[in-house]
Image: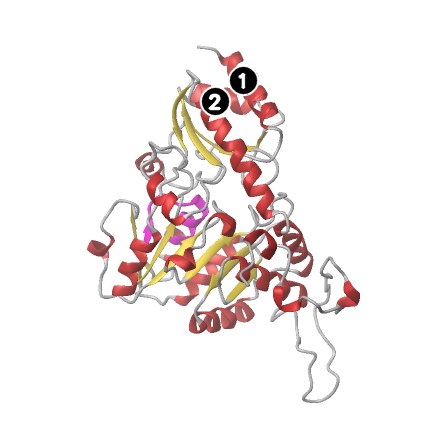
Amino acid sequence: MSRGLGTKCIHLEEVEGCYDHFGSISYPIYQTATYAHPGVGKSTGYDYSRLQNPTRERLEKVVASIENGTDALALSSGMAAIAMMMELFSPGDHLIVDADLYGGSIRLFENVSRKNGIQITSIDCYKENIEEYINDNTKGVYIETPTNPMMNVTDIEKVSGITKKHDLLLIVDNTFLSPYFQNPLDLGADIVVHSGTKYLSGHNDTLAGFLVTNQKEISEQLRFLIKTTGAGLSPFDSWLILRGIKTLGVRMERSQENAIEIVSWLKKQSLVTKVIYPGLSEHPGYEVMKKQSRGFGSMITFQVRDKKCALSILEGVKMIKYAESLGGVDTLITYPETQTHADVPKEVRIKNGITDATLRLSVGIEDVRDLIDELTEVFSKIGD
């Protein structure tokens, strides 16, 4: 019997009916670095926590389940996950990557991957012909959908048709929608990336990253890398993410409901020149989102009149926090130019549509009336 996603976030079907760990409902934190062996040639199943830990293993099984993968690896941050994933490639390999990505990903690709001999071509994957950029040494395509922060939507199934035709890996960063609203593996992706710090955690209290796959060979390669590079998630942080995932469904639904109301409010404001949200029918990716996702998420990017207006909003908010990150129960407002994308060259930011009047809103689960009331007060002080 197929389980709903909300149930899968809470229950791991394979252990139902078992009363291990003294029947503990909250999975225990195995805060240990190493494990004693019952005898020579015998093992409890665990040897050293860099290789595996029961708490991390439980988390990985839950994430694999909700992403419809066969294996998931939990790492110390989203960037640690992407950095380790890049170890699948060798000097001289070529990757096609989305032009509009999280600034940390761009920084990694441009400053570390290139230094290591990986050739990178950045294009707008949502609208450009990817096949035109494929060379003999091309090994993979890396996309976000929706992208951070300009909310471009790429047709995952369409891109997977291209990557399968040319025997390339398709890697999809699914952080913005989480497994609750989108499952890229079902659409043909080979590897799914998550910053678990965001929606999977949901409380802005820990860092984590995930790589999920449904292919045995990729799983074996990644398992070798995680034990070799040593970036596995700690037991306590694994427990925090496990706890967060239990409420993933209700949080995603509530924050999306709030986002839709705030989008409607923003569109009526004279200070706002553009609202970018894939749930708007006028968004270029609206139909693709309806086809490949179960929701539109709670990330909103909007442009205001000028830099002075943007800074006034950031200075004026109180309950809404001016902070980097996203995906928590708290509503956060971010200034990409000096925060998430500060290390991206100005000409690249401008090309991608990020200006000094661009703001990004991660909508939380507060009472939406309170959020709109605060924004109304802040906007009214700026005036026309």
**Residue on which the image places disc 1:** 376
Proximity of marks 2 and 1: CB atoms separated by less than 8 Å:
yes
Q: Amino acid at mark 1?
A: Thr
- The C terminus appears in which quarter of the rendering? top left
64 horizontally vs 31: left or right: left
Residue at the left extreme? 132
Q: Tell me if residue 200 comes above or below residue 338 in the rendering.
A: below
- The quadrant the N terminus occupies is bottom right
Image: 33 above or below 333: below
Counting other residues with Cα less than 10 Å from the Cα at mark 1, is it few (<14), some (14-19), or many (20 or more)? some
Is 353 situated left or right of 191 in this image?
left
Residue at image coords 38%, 61%: 116
x and y, in percent, of residue 383 in the image: 48, 11
Cα–Cα span, label 2 and label 1: 9 Å
Pointer 2 residue: 265
Q: Which residues are magenta?
A: 95-110
Of the two numbered discs 2 and 1 on the same chain, state the one appearing first in sequence.
2
Q: Is residue 246 magenta?
A: no
Point out residue 342 in the picture as x, y percentages from the top left corner.
44, 38
> What residue is rendered at 25% in x and 65% in y?
166
Give the class, few, some or many, for how many residues have Cα within 10 Å of label 2's Cα (few <14, many ≥20): few
36 relative to 370, above or below: below
Q: Quadrant of residue 307?
A: top left
Residue located farthest toward the bottom when viewing the structure as drawn: 40
Residue 138 image point, x, y percent: 28, 63
Query: Is 98 colored magenta in this rendering?
Result: yes
Residue 120 shows up from this direction = no
Q: Residue at x 46, y 43 (%)?
A: 295
Q: Nearer the viewer, residue 26 or 314?
A: 26
List x then y, in percent, for residue 144.
40, 48
Local secondary structure at mark 1: helix
